[in-house]
Image: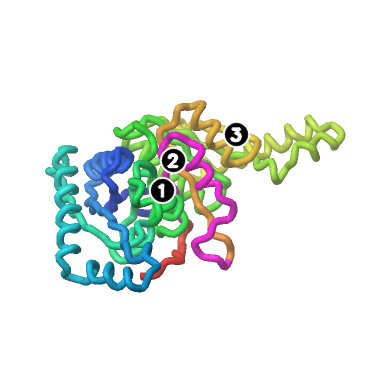
Amino acid sequence: MNSQSGTVGYKNILVATDFSKHAEAAFKQAIWLARRNGAKITLVHTIPDMRQAVSSASYQARVSLLYEDGSLFQQEIRQTSETQMRQLIESLGAGDLAIQFETLLGVPYSQITMAVQKSGYDLVLAGTRGLATWQQFFVGSTANRLIRTCPSSVWIAKSEHVGPPQSVLAATDFSEVSRRAVFEGLEIARRASAEFHLLHIIDSADVPEDLIAKVPESHSLRDEINEAAREHLDQFVASLGIDSMGVHKHLSFGVPWQEVSRLARHLNIDLISIGTIGRSGIPGVFLGNTAEKVLTSCDCSILTVKPEGFISPITS
């Protein structure tokens, strides 16, 4: 993937599945991407490690025996998992693709992150609902934690729309990471023959409405702010080196995550592409949490893109 030149092509995709309908939707997205990009897919199912839920020393000792390498229990759960994955591949008509599958043991978001670090996946696809009750202790919000920790781009499939997206929205604050998110969203839209929308938000925290209201000729000031932002957006699009005729530009004022969600609903967007930004000196923790708030407030899928040089707080 080369975000500097504007060319993006996922070639090594990891799909995390819990066999729910949302995970199945994620797998379907991976299938069409793999066919368009010539990418390889690895399907992964993570089984929670029950040792982490047991506090009693005596029970820990008993449970630990079950999880010893090569134990009959381990063999059985892996066989069951792999049988389910084979059946899933066959049921979705993906037998023509070179799909590998693997069963991992541990906390899902942590195991997925370490798999990305080890094998260099450039995209992780996962669902966000449908986890069985017994898994909740281990997972919490696996999607949110993947957004925070996984070094690759993460596509969280939420909607019932399981085919290629028909409309893609990218949000930009003109930062380098948002440029990467725009390029990735653009390429997905191009390969899916989808509409592409680009949004810039004038953050109300930077220009409070109550402050504007106190300024004489505030309408003129607001117009100047909007005009400057519009010019900046036009310059940003020009700097991408693409045909801007197919880009629908939008300018908004307000709280970023609320404005992204509002426009996505208004335009019936299938996929939002958004960058994530690390706090200085705190790898893996995000300044604000716009991406996570968008994830919880929207019914569409979301693609989150990391900054260049992102360092995950999880190490293998």
Query: What residue appears at the point 23 percent right and 53 percent down from the top-left corner?
Result: 42
Q: Are marks 2 and 1 in contact (CB under 8 Å)?
A: yes
Q: CA distance from mark 2 to mark 1?
A: 8 Å
Residue 282 position by quadrant: bottom right
Relative image position of residue 140 (x, y in whole percent)? 43, 52
Start-end of magenta stretch? 281-306
Does the magenta segment cover residue 303? yes
The answer to whether any part of residue 116 appears in the image is no
Q: Which residue is mark 3?
A: 251
Does the magenta segment cover residue 292? yes
Quarter of the image with the C terminus is bottom left
Query: What residue appears at the point 38 percent right and 34 percent down from the top-left corner?
Result: 159
Relative image position of residue 222 (x, y in whole percent)? 74, 34
Q: Which residue is mark 1?
A: 6
Query: What residue appears at the point 39 percent right and 44 percent down from the top-left corner?
Result: 128
Find residue 242 and name its label: 2
